[in-house]
Image (cartoon, helix red, strand yellow):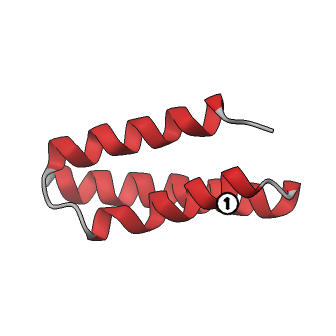
Amino acid sequence: MAALFAGILFSGIGFIAFRYGRKQNSVQAMVIGVVLMVYPYFIANAIIMWLIGVALIAGLFLFRD
């Protein structure tokens, strides 16, 4: 259940980040957004999924243009 919730949450955040990156012409935001949308399909462990998702979201804020 935790993996399903994490996948939906991080995919939604990734979609928002991708749209923001397209609007602002920010390649970093678009790439991180795509990775956030896709990686839950390849990770089955909920704890690892949460760790990767939090790290990617932190990367959104740390690596801004």
Rendered residue at 64%/32% (across/down): 61
Query: Taking 28 as reference, is 36 left or right?
Result: left
On screen, residue 64 above or below 53: above
Q: Position of residue 47 (x, y in %)?
A: 17, 41
Rendered residue at 68%/51% (across/down): 29
Q: Position of residue 22 (x, y in %)?
A: 79, 64
Query: Taking 44 as reference, is 57 left or right?
Result: right
- The quadrant of the picture occupied by the N terminus is bottom left
SS type, badge 1: helix
- The quadrant of the picture occupied by the C terminus is top right
Rendered residue at 85%/60% (across/down): 23
Amino acid beneath label 1 = Met
State the image quarter where residue 39 is shown. Answer: bottom left
**Neighbours of disc 1 within 10 Å: few (<14), some (14-19), many (20+):** many
Q: Where is residue 50 in the image (x, y as percent from the top left)?
A: 28, 42
Query: Taking 60 as reference, is 4 left or right?
Result: left
| Residue at image mark 1 | 30
Rendered residue at 41%/68% (across/down): 38
Query: Taking 4 as reference, is 40 left or right?
Result: right
